[in-house]
Amino acid sequence: MPADIEDFDRVLTECVTIVSRVVPDSPMVSVTLCARTGLRTVACSHAKAELFDELQSAAGQGPVLDAIGHGIAVTADDLTADSRWRRFTADTTEVRSLYSEPLEWEGSSFGAITLYSGDAGGFADETRVAVRVTADHIVLLYRTALDAARMREIAAQLKEALNTRAIIDQALGIIMAQRRCTSHQAFEILRNVSQVKNVKLYQVAATIVETVSGEPPQRPRFEEPPQRTADPKK
């Protein structure tokens, strides 16, 4: 899960709040994602839903873990008569029925959306269909947010590459003037110095520019392109 996705958690919270309100009996809803340290509840309609997720993570077993691990929906109509997750059910008596739908992308599960209820009897087919549709929307949100984060990272890398390239070009110009050589020969000189001193190429270039000019090289400023706005006439 990318750490710089700012609005992802907020949108998910809105999703689970809507689900909790529109499905019958207003169950507790949570969205859980896989993290390096275990499960991470990124959105929930009730604080207890997050607690139930944490209990499963601590116990190392539970319907959410099964849904994510096997990539199939997990349901329980009455946990008091269910022996599949004894370590989890032993720590809570407030949940009687639940339904956990995995979140799948590119052939693997990366999380789950789960309904918790204090009443036995499970959830109606219509409710489970609604949860599956919501899961699809969450996957789409995740993919969109991840793509946006990757684009921001690529843009930052491109800016850095352009900045360092400008400094290298300044250094090449200085070497060409001093050595009366071609740009290719100047680059070979710069690269050899970089290898001998075991210093990055642009750092050697920056030192050359600063030595000649008496001040650190000025990086070019790249302005963000203006954002497009929708034409109100259309």
Image (cartoon, rainbow, N blue to C red):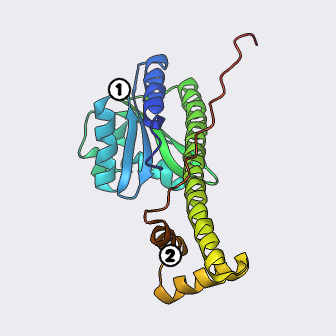
Instruction: Depth check: give the residue in front, 42 or 195.
Output: 195
Q: Amino acid at mark 2?
A: Val
Q: Residues within 10 Å of mark 1 (few under 14, many from 20)?
A: some
Q: Nearer the viewer, mark 2 or mark 1?
A: 2
Q: Is residue 211 left or right of residue 55?
A: right
Q: List the residue tagged with mark 1.
A: 119
Q: Is residue 144 left or right of residue 28?
A: right
Give the x, y percent position of residue 24.
46, 18
Give the x, y percent position of residue 109.
54, 51
Q: Is residue 5 left or right of residue 164?
A: left
Q: Residues within 10 Å of mark 2 (few under 14, many from 20)?
A: some
Instruction: Depth check: give the residue in front, 219 or 93.
Output: 219
Who's the residue at 25% across and 37% down the image? Answer: 93
Q: List the residue tagged with mark 2.
A: 204
Give the x, y percent position of residue 26.
41, 20
Who's the residue at 50% across and 73% down the image? Answer: 208
